Image (cartoon, rainbow, N blue to C red):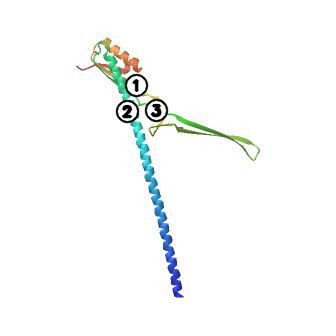
Amino acid sequence: MNNFFKKIKGEKTNNKKKIENLVSLIIILIITVIIMNRIWNGDTQKKQENKTEENTSVLATEEETTKEELEKKLENILSTVKGVGEVKVFINYSESSSVEPLYDETTTTSTTEEGDSSGGTRNVTETETQKDVVFSEKSGNKEPVTQKTTMPVIQGAIVTAEGAEDVTVKTNIISAIGAVTGLSIDKVQVFEMQK
């Protein structure tokens, strides 16, 4: 009889160890799945951040190129004006350009009529709007479709020119810069270039 109780007690201990081992295995599996999920999501998030940084850097490069192109065009045109000679132009911008993406907007409206205990009714209207950015796919990369690009605002200009000591030449330079940029006379400064 004593052996019988020892045998039952041994089986209970053995079953208890099996359950503990099974629970430990399940906990380890759950932790492994969580860690793998975080690693995978982290890689995806890093790729998205890298694409965003690349797009931002491309936009910044394009903006700088546009600014430099305007300065170069002004320098080329002004250098052909009689009496101006060599010219350098610097244009100051108050802000950077901004890009407004195109949105796919869906609006859902639902009207519900509710009655209360005193016999009155009321209409409840719910409107739900969902905006999603529209993307186009080029060479396997998704890029947002732009609705509008706002160019930076020109705040002022500085020009140095060889012939700037002549008042007529200086006036012609100020007029030309004002015509191209829309700046008023007080926002364009012209100086004689050092020889």
- Pointer 2: residues within 10 angstroms few (<14), some, or many (20+)? few
**Residue drawn at x 39%, y 35% as measured from the top left:** 58
Q: Which residue is mark 3?
A: 99
Label 3 element class: strand
Neighbours of disc 3 within 10 Å: few (<14), some (14-19), many (20+): some
Q: Which residue is mark 2?
A: 61
The residue located at (47%, 61%) in the rendering is 29
CA separation in Å, label 2 and label 3? 14 Å
Q: Which residue is mark 1?
A: 154
Contact check, label 1 and label 3, Cβ < 8 Å: no
Instruction: Indicate the amino acid at tag 1.
Output: Ile
On the question of residue 184 being in view, the answer is: no
Q: CA distance from mark 1 to mark 3?
A: 17 Å
Judge whether 149 appears above or below 3 on screen.
above
Amino acid type at circle 2 is Thr
Image disc number at residue 188: none
